[in-house]
Image (cartoon, rainbow, N blue to C red):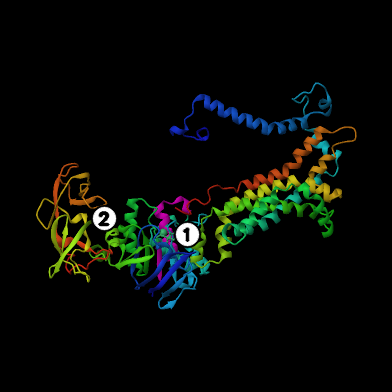
Amino acid sequence: MGQLSLKRVVKTFGSIEVVKGVDLDVQEGEFVVFVGPSGCGKSTLLRMIAGLEHTSAGDILINGERVNDLPPVKRGIAMVFQSYALYPHMSVFENIAFPLRVEKAPEDVLKRKVQAAADILHLENRLQQKPGQLSGGQRQRVAIGRAIVREPKIFLFDEPLSNLDAALRADMRIELTRLHKQLGATMIYVTHDQIEAMTMADRIVVLNFGNIAQVGAPLELYHRPENLFVAGFIGNPRMNILPATGVKSGPEGVTVDCLGQRLTVPVAPPRTGIEGAALSLGIRPEHIHLGDGRDLRLNLTPTVVEQLGQHTIGYATVEGMEPTFCFVLPGSRPVHDDRPLDVNFRARDCHLFDADGQALPRRPGVEDSD
Amino acid sequence: MALFRKENTAMIDRYSWWEIVAIYAGIAAFLFFMLSPFIEGFLVSLKPLAQLFSSPYTFWPENGSFDAYFTMWDSVPGFGRYIFNSFLISTVATVIVLLLVVPAAYAFARFNYQGMGLVLGGFLAISMFSGAVLLIPLFRLMRTLGLLNTYFAMIVPGVAFLIPSAIWLLRTYMKRIPLELNEAAYMDGASQFYTFRRVILPIASPGIIVVAITTFIGAYAQQFVFALSFNSKTEYMPLPVGLFAYFGRQEVIWNELMAASFVGITPALIIIFFLQRYLVGGLTAGAVK
Ligand SMILES: Nc1ncnc2c1ncn2[C@@H]1O[C@H](COP(=O)(O)OP(=O)(O)O)[C@@H](O)[C@H]1O
Ligand SMILES: [Mg+2]
């Protein structure tokens, strides 16, 4: 059992509200990722769930029981710290065994559990070494082992991979996903890295300044961001946002004027009037194609072109758009900096946001557009 | 520093010949000033008394011998007792200081409460007081407590003067132990005391040993003043008082005095070397990151 509910959870440090009334339900066995920019309150929220931070207001429920005032160990929760927090003077075996020593588990039970955790994490040959002799990835695994032996209902991870290099991070992502399947436990994982969020999560919670910006499955966030913040945060490179003016709405969607061209985006119309409304049109760099045709055409002169083989990324200035316009083309394409070229995109790949940055809901079926 | 490294490939560790000469010259000058009193003292302990009073003064011993190391015990029959007293006073003082300072330093390192800065600042101010300024009030205090002419007359004020700097030293060391270690242990259900004993103490042990050494040395250094002020019983007198016994009515038995000095500090040196072996640097490696 590892069901978690947050009910209007608030955290204030002095007069500063860091977590501003978060509501969330996490199902048993779910892998939930908290993602958001640095300083948005992810760690604070996680530490409140863990029982390391006092909850200023609201309730935290685990399996229906209010745990606000329970110490971590009584919440049935284990946590893996970003810094690993291994005990440097103890062997790997003793590090993993630490929670069992605390609860005075019998020696044979302790040995069996540590051995089992070491097997899962491929640490069998490291048990007698000290943390200082291990690589970053191995230390991370020891920290996870220390969490596993307690057989918690809920695992908490605070940016556990951020101290590892890129290759190791990719490996550990896969290992963690596998571990989640194997243990079937509820896992809550904090990261600022959207790749980790997209690849591992059953559901992603996007946090922005202590508020939940959106909760949803990874592809849901990608295809149907509910606001400009999520649209900009999920997806790499970021979605391009172009200024647009509402023209009319009809059964086909909302027609807008963007860069002097008209296109009809298949989204539900806003409740307020559409005519002359200041809107933002979002288009992901990977939905931009070379050549002309399709619904909106642009003539660009890229200032920088990055050839990655797998794809070609170009950056250009577009009038009225603040950060540079970015496009991603599949494969290596004959695109060069300072040489003008035509690109285009389809209306059905576009997102529309109102003046408050809220998305106009996209019509069903936009996900399988290609 | 490249000079002490086996392999010297980093460009920043390359020195030109004159830089190396300058470095060694600096080290040599430093060692000369540090060690020359000891070397001179040792040479004096080897010289026959007659040579010491001959003129002109000669630096190297003629007919040098270790005789003084044997005759010193006859000139001052109770000298062994002085050595024992010093050792006892310092050891007991060090043990008491550690018992008080280790938990106190941990509290100062980990727990925040109002007025902590004031208390710590107060400690610093106290440790700047010269003991001599306080001798008269201390004397009255010792008399009131009935501690005059006991070992405690030298231990108790000694402990009081040694605690502040020990707390500062150890607190700084303990503050460097990552807070996440406490949090991780707390997550696993460990009590504050369990965490202190099983996690903090072992990691802080190099710092504790440094504090033990400095306290032990400090206790040796300060006993003299307390002994002269609060104790009049020969049987409790520490080493420095014993050394005065070599100042005869007519002459000072310099060679035996020097020999006695070296013999007297030997137990302390043994203790310090023993403690030093447990000074393992970098014990926190691998805790975080
Ligand atoms: N103990 C604290 N006291 C005061 N402010 C804090 C404390 N812990 C965190 N904060 C503040 O709360 C905000 C959120 O911090 P945190 O949860 O660590 O962000 P994240 O993990 O998303 O990067 C930050 O602005 C941070 O400065
Ligand atoms: Mg954080």
Q: Chain of mark 2?
A: A
Quadrant (top left, top right, bottom left, bottom right) of the N terminus of chain A: bottom left
Please report the bounds of the magenta region as a residue range.
A130-157
Can the viewer see residue A351?
yes
Q: Residue furthest top?
A: B56
Q: Quadrant of residue B70?
A: top right
Q: Is residue A153 magenta?
A: yes
Please tell me which residue is depicted at 84% across the width and 33% down the height of the picture. Answer: B253
Q: Is B269 situated above or below B103?
A: above
* Residue kind at label 1, given as amino acid type: Phe
Q: Evaluate if marks 1 and 2 touch, with contact meaning CB atoms under 8 Å apart.
A: no
Label 2 element class: loop
Q: Is residue B285 left or right of residue B242?
A: left
What residue did someone put label 2 on? Answer: A238
Ligand 1 neighbours mark 2 (CB distance < 8 Å): no
Please tell me which residue is depicted at 78% across the width and 35% down the height of the picture. Answer: B258
Q: Is residue A352 magenta?
A: no
Displayed-image quarter of ligand 1: bottom left
What residue did someone put label 1 on? Answer: A93
Quadrant (top left, top right, bottom left, bottom right) of the C terminus of chain A: bottom left
